[in-house]
Amino acid sequence: MSLQVFNSNVEGDAFYLKGSTWILNAYPFTVSCWYRAVDTVTSGHCCVCLAGEALNTNTIRMKAGNGLASLQVNTDTVSTPAIGVVRGAWCHIAGVGASATSRSAYIQGGNKTTSVVNVTCTSTAVARIGSSGNTNTGAHGFVAEIAVWNTALDDTQIADLARGRNPQMFSLPNLIFYAPLKSTRRNSMNRPAIINRPASGSTITFVPTGGEIFISPEHPPVQDLQTSRKSYFMPDLKAYYRQNFFPLIMES
């Protein structure tokens, strides 16, 4: 399942989730999510806004469009190369802010682009899922598996997330927000997060804004935590036993 949101610039109405507080507004950070666009994937589709007013540049936003992913912090936006994302297909996008002079955007686990422009965010305006708050820049499609860390994940970890690893596999103490958005009950959409400890210090709740929020049976290919643990560690264990114990068996 996933959350279906609409951009008013396309459909005439904007449906998204508005938070009760902000998630994060400082470095370092990592934001990861999956997005499946249902229109021509024009630029500026905001999948998640960690903090920031609708028309204010003092913000942190993860956006998709035109086959690329963009991370916006304040007045600076860093975008990946366009890789021709197919409309109707799930796409993994991520942004990593290592410092005020190092921010990177990723799409499909790679295609990394980095900006060194010196910018910061100090906003304490509420977070949003599926919109920046500006109805002409919201997502138009399906959003799922939103994860936010207060640390900078590395390239390998971002690639693993795009392969479908569960976000809880990576730097769990630093994972401050995780919303799979798998609920099938509309009344549970105000509590979509299973990890909910934002930097604001207050548990965040969400309410539908602009109309009815739709739940789709579609969901990106992300493993549950148990499956992810097995697939992540078993190859290493097999290699360890093959290297250390198999020769002893053959010699005996």
Image: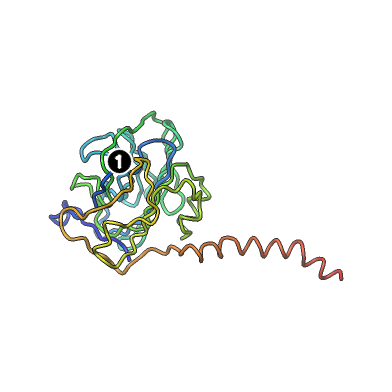
Determine which quarter of the picture holds residue 180. bottom left
Image quadrant containing the N terminus:
bottom left
**Depicted 77 relative to depicted 43: above or below:** above
Report crowding for label 1: few under 14, some 14 to 19, many 20 or more residues within 10 A (C-alpha): many
Q: Where does label 1 land, which residue?
A: 51
Q: Could you tell me which residue is drawn at 29 percent across and 35 percent down?
A: 123
Residue 219 in the image, given as x and y percentages of width and height = 35, 65
Question: What element does badge 1 sit on?
Answer: strand
Q: Is residue 203 left or right of residue 164?
A: left
Residue 218 sits above or below residue 33 on the image: below
Q: Position of residue 78 (x, y in %)?
A: 37, 39
Q: Position of residue 151 (x, y in %)?
A: 47, 42
Q: Nearer the viewer, residue 54 or 90?
A: 54
Image location of residue 9, percent across then percent down? 16, 51
Give amino acid for label 1. Answer: Ala
The residue located at (44%, 48%) in the rendering is 175
Determine the image quadrant of residue 57.
top left
Q: Report the residue that reaches farthest toward the front.
A: 202
Give left or right: position of 62 versus 110.
left
Q: Quadrant of the C terminus?
A: bottom right
